[in-house]
C-alpha cells in the first residue's frame, strides 16, 4: 500500500458573517494515498470549493490540520505553503484564472518555466494539443470560449506534473464529448504518473470513474463511498 499523500483531520472553516459566525465546514477528515482518485459531490453552497482550497493549501482552516505530501500545512508560513504548492499541486479553479496578458501557450508554459524546463514551449504546445487546442496556441484568454479557457487551465495544471491535481468542476463548462475527452486525460495522468486526483464535480459519469466519492451537505461529510 502506498503512503498517504493527503490527509485532513477535523477540518473546520468558520467565517464571520453579518448575522454571526458562518460554519462552512464541520470537522471533516479524510485520507488519500498516492494514485487515489476522489470525487467531492454535493449541492451548490455545500462547501466543496472551500474544502478544495483548504486541501490544496490555498486557504487556512479555522481548526484542524492538512498534511500534503508529508508537509503539515498548519506549521508553514504563506511562502512555505506556496513552495509546497509549487512542488506538489496542480489546481484547476472553478473560474479558470488564466492570466489575461498571456496567450494560451504562455499560460501553460508558465509553470514549466518556473520549474526551469528547457523544453517549456514544446511541452506546453504538446499539452494544448492533448486538450484539443493545438490551433489556439497564440490566442488570448478573452478570445477563447469558456470551455476552451477551461481546457487551457487543465493543460496548465498538468504542466508541472503535480503529485496531486485538484480540479473544481473540470467538465462543468464542456459539452459531453469534450468533457469525456478531458476526463480520459485526467485518468490517463492518474494511471501513467500516479497523479492523485481530487475533483469537485456535478458530473455523475466523472464521479463514477473516481475510486472514492464523498458527499457534502451544508459543510458536513454525509457519505463516503469506496469502489
Ligand atoms: N470567504 C467567505 N466568506 C463568507 N462566506 C463564504 C466564504 N467562502 C464561502 N462562503 C460560503 O460558504 C458556503 C460554501 O461555499 P463553497 O464555495 O465552498 O460552495 P460550493 O459547494 O463550492 O458551491 P458551488 O457548487 O456553487 O460552487 C456558501 O454558502 C458560501 O456563500
Ligand atoms: Mg464551488
Image (cartoon, rainbow, N blue to C red):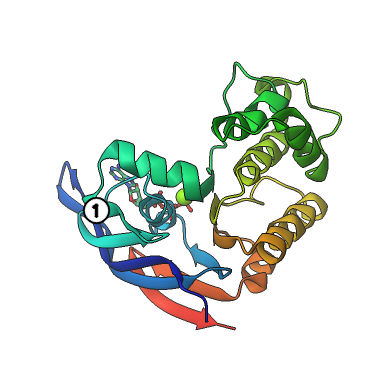
Image mark count: 1
User: Residue 178 at what x, y percent from top left?
Assistant: 79, 50
Quadrant containing the C terminus is bottom right
In the displayed structure, 220 sits above or below 110; it is below
User: Residue 18 at what x, y percent from top left?
Assistant: 16, 41
Residue at position x 57%, y 24% from top?
99
User: Residue 157 at what x, y percent from top left?
Assistant: 60, 43
User: Residue 134 at what x, y percent from top left?
Assistant: 84, 33
Residue at position x 34%, y 63% from top?
218
Q: What element carries label 1?
A: helix
Residue at position x 74%, y 28% from top?
121
In the displayed structure, 12 sits above or below 132; it is below
Q: Residue pushed farthest right?
A: 135
Residue at position x 66%, y 63% from top?
190
Give the residue number, with chain letter if any, for mark 1: 74
Quarter of the image for residue 26 reads bottom left
Amino acid at each position: 500500500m502506498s503512503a498517504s499523500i493527503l490527509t485532513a483531520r477535523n477540518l473546520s472553516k468558520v467565517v464571520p458573517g453579518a448575522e454571526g459566525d458562518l460554519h462552512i465546514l464541520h470537522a471533516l477528515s479524510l485520507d488519500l494515498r498516492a494514485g487515489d482518485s476522489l470525487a467531492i459531490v454535493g449541492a451548490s453552497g455545500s462547501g466543496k470549493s472551500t474544502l478544495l482550497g483548504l486541501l490544496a493549501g490555498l486557504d487556512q482552516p479555522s481548526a484542524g490540520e492538512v498534511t500534503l505530501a508529508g508537509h503539515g500545512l498548519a506549521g508553514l508560513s504563506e511562502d512555505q505553503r506556496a513552495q509546497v504548492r509549487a512542488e506538489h499541486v496542480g489546481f484547476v479553479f472553478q473560474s479558470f484564472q488564466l492570466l489575461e496578458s498571456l496567450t494560451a501557450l504562455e499560460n501553460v508554459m508558465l509553470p514549466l518555466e518556473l520549474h526551469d524546463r528547457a523544453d517549456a514551449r514544446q511541452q506546453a504546445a504538446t499539452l494544448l494539443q492533448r486538450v484539443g487546442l493545438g490551433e489556439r496556441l497564440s490566442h488570448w484568454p478573452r478570445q477563447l470560449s469558456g470551455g476552451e479557457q477551461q481546457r487551457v487551465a487543465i493543460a496548465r495544471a498538468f504542466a508541472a506534473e503535480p503529485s496531486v491535481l485538484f480540479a473544481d468542476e473540470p467538465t462543468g463548462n464542456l459539452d459531453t464529448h469534450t468533457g469525456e475527452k478531458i476526463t480520459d486525460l485526467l485518468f490517463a495522468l492518474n494511471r501513467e504518473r500516479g497523479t492523485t486526483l481530487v475533483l469537485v464535480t456535478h458530473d455523475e459519469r466523472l464521479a463514477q470513474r473516481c475510486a472514492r466519492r464523498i458527499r457534502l451537505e451544508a459543510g458536513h461529510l454525509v457519505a463516503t463511498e469506496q469502489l
